Image: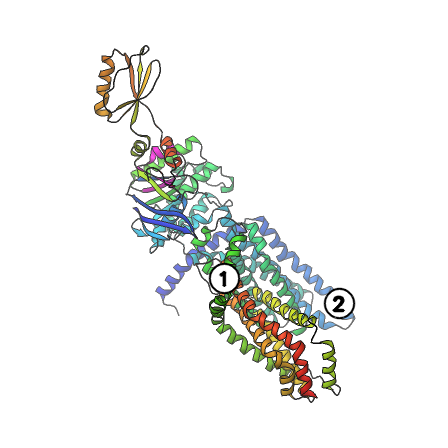
Amino acid sequence: MIPLLGRRRLLSAFSPSLIVARREVRDQFRDWRIIIPILFLTLFFPFLMNFTAQQILGFVQQYGATIIGERLVPFLLMIVGFFPISASLVIALESFVGEKERGSIEPLLSSPIKDWQLYLGKLISSIVPSLAASFLGMGVYLIGLVLKGVRLPEANLLVQIFMLTIAQAIVMVSGAVVVSTQATSVKAANLLASFIIIPMALLIQGEAVVMFWGRETLSLWWIVFGLIVLAALFVRIGLAHFQREELLGREIDVLNVRWGWRVFRQGFSGGAKTLRQWYRQAVSASLHSLRFSLLAVVVLAIIGVVIGVQQTRNFEILMPSMQMDERLETVLDILPVSSAAPVALILWQNVRVLIVALVFGICSFGILGVIPIFATMALLGFLVQTLANNGIPAEMTILGLILPHGVFEIPALILAGAAVLQIGVVLATPTSKRTVGEVFLTSLAEWMRVVVGIILPLLILAAIIETWVTPRIGLVLFR
Amino acid sequence: MIYTESLTKYFDNFLAVDAVNLDVRQGQILVLLGPNGAGKTTTARMLTSILVPSAGTAKVAGYDVVREADRVRASVGVLTEHHGLYGRMNPVEYLEFYAALFGMDRTRATRRIDELLEQFGLTQARKQRLGEYSKGMRQKLALVRALIHDPPVLLLDEPTSAMDPESARMVRDSIRTLRSEQRTILMCTHNLSEAEELADQIAIIRRGRVILNDTPVNIKSILLGPEEFEVQLAGSLDGRMGDWPDGVALTAQDENWLRFKIENPQTTNPMLLRRLLEQDMRVVSFNLVARSLEDAYIQAVMHDTPSGKAPLA
């Protein structure tokens, strides 16, 4: 129980946020550009989804595929809930950048309101109306189902979908704030918003997969948890950058390539003049800063191997009697020592993994960037155990087929995962001294520094060994 | 009430405000003059605790702009360059919103809103949406917003821009009234006659540096030299050109008039008049030639030296 004085103080601390939120909500309800789409999505769209659900249920039942129909009903509920909250993104951009663009932010910033109070007020005003519309729409949809005699999804799933909707709304709005700190016009912010919309669209597709196929194994709670973590990171960054100084310090949305290049180059070189100095100062500094991310990725890699091994119980593959030496002979024919093409091919495959990890990592504060490493290690564990189950001892597989090049490739991949994770760590560590763009460019430059300085040389070496040496060692061992 | 010492602001490597020193006492008006991009708005933003100074100190209404930012904001009324009104609100809703942000209770806010709307002639338009307001009305309402919490210090950026002459006069009168109520006002403007009319002090700022800070009269004297007088004669000079007393320099002449720059008019003018009469010149009038602040300002901001500093900096 909060003491009376403490509660009063708490209320007075939040009071300016509520004043701002109230004004903004009132303003939104006077804007037909917001009201009409929300009304449509709240009232008409759920009916349309009811109709769709009923039609599809009838259709799939004809073919005995009732499970598709049953799983479609909650999926459509999620869609009904998602559409109105997608408006929250637009409202947030309008609220944060629109004020900057119209010049109405400065009088606000001249008032005694604190930065966090203003941020919170705007966050509430962007989330609450769209979320209310979303719940209303979901309510209309569910009532429609009841009236039409369609069985409602179980309570646990309903709660998951409602929580998912709330988490998505918070992610979109808090993400929009981060975007809006980088723009001074709504037009520029809308363009930057694709960095939120595209991952959200991919997420919806992922959620669809989970809801239709993987509900039993992968609970939606994990997605809710992931989104809440993401929202918390966005809020943290937003709060760090939603500051008077930064809001009014940036005047125009000019793509300053020269500035961007300078920041990147400085981040990459770390001020070093020679290659030796670069390795001794910049690269070693990067490695030092990677130590915690490195530890996390190593742990994850070990977990990946263990999971891979365990999965051989679920997906047992029995191979016909294997003559490993014959197979290796064939490999040697394909990979002659004189040919560089297979080396390039293997290297390109690994570089592709680096790029995919980077893209995933950028969209998820580094978290999804470690997936390729995790998947590779799981696959490795699975492969070694599967071969072991087929009579080839694990130590022979490891020594003969993995370790010769793996001693270079595995550390390179773990380092790559750590470097991507580090981008997320740096982005999620707010600093009011530098803009989000500056932090992003610097972290990207640091990633590049590790990739060029260590990972690429290791991968080149690994590709050469994998092509020219590993099959021969394997052959010696398996003969 | 407004005091700055070596107030400096960098944006990355760009020096926007360079060691500005200001001292504005209670009940005084300081006008900041300078070309666009000179650093006026940045200075004003530091004084409202929106921007944090890179170096130097500033106190507004007795509060430090960095350490006591909230108190500074609560003590200052700001009229920004962009009026920043919300088009879908009416003036009462708008002012109530700001009154609430400044922590005013409802009764006090209502009374103050009625009073200010009446004072600025906006009572008739109190139910109109702000989007329907004319430019001048918006500007007046923005000024009302700056005054809503009855602040002791006002920072006004172009207070009469976009106003018709009648409204501009009303606002100027209001500013005078505010000064007489012992409020301290810092005003940025490009309207030089307005600056001359209202200012107790003028600070000319260029490239982030205050190059001159004095009263309007002194600024003109410093920049334009001694005062100039014109003597109108009945009839032509007919080549009569006497020698003039010390401290008098003839600057221009025509058939029936002469212009002099006089360093010490109080003592020199009677001597000069006597000299003219002695030379049988029939003086019709002896007038001070009006000099505008504009001339002085142009002199200050345009006169560049190789060092990049104004001659009087």
Front residue of A56 and A322: A322
Vertical position of residue B277 compared to residue A461: above or below: above
Other-residue count near label 1 (Cα within 10 Å), few / some / many at <14 / 14–19 / ≥20? many
Vertical position of residue A34 compared to residue A69: above or below: above
Residue at mark 1 shares a chain with residue at mark 2: yes
Q: Residue B207, located in which quarter of the rendered image?
A: top left
Front residue of A92 and B2: B2
Question: Is residue B35 within the magenta segment?
Answer: no
Residue B22: % across, % down: 31, 44
- Chain at numbered mark 2: A
Front residue of B268 and B172: B268
Name of the residue lying farthest toward the front: A338
Q: Residue B154, located in which quarter of the rendered image?
A: top left
Q: Give yes or no for contact between labels 1 and 2 (Cβ–Cβ under 8 Å).
A: no
Tag 1 secondary structure: helix
Could one spot residue A156 in this view of the protein?
A: no
| Label annotation for residue A337 | none
Badge 2 is on which residue? Answer: A58
Instruction: Give the magenta range.
Output: B184-207
Badge 1 is on which residue? Answer: A267
**How many numbered discs, if any?**
2
Amino acid residing under circle 1: Gly
Could one spot residue A190 in this view of the protein?
A: yes
Residue A30: % across, % down: 54, 48
Amino acid residing under circle 2: Gly
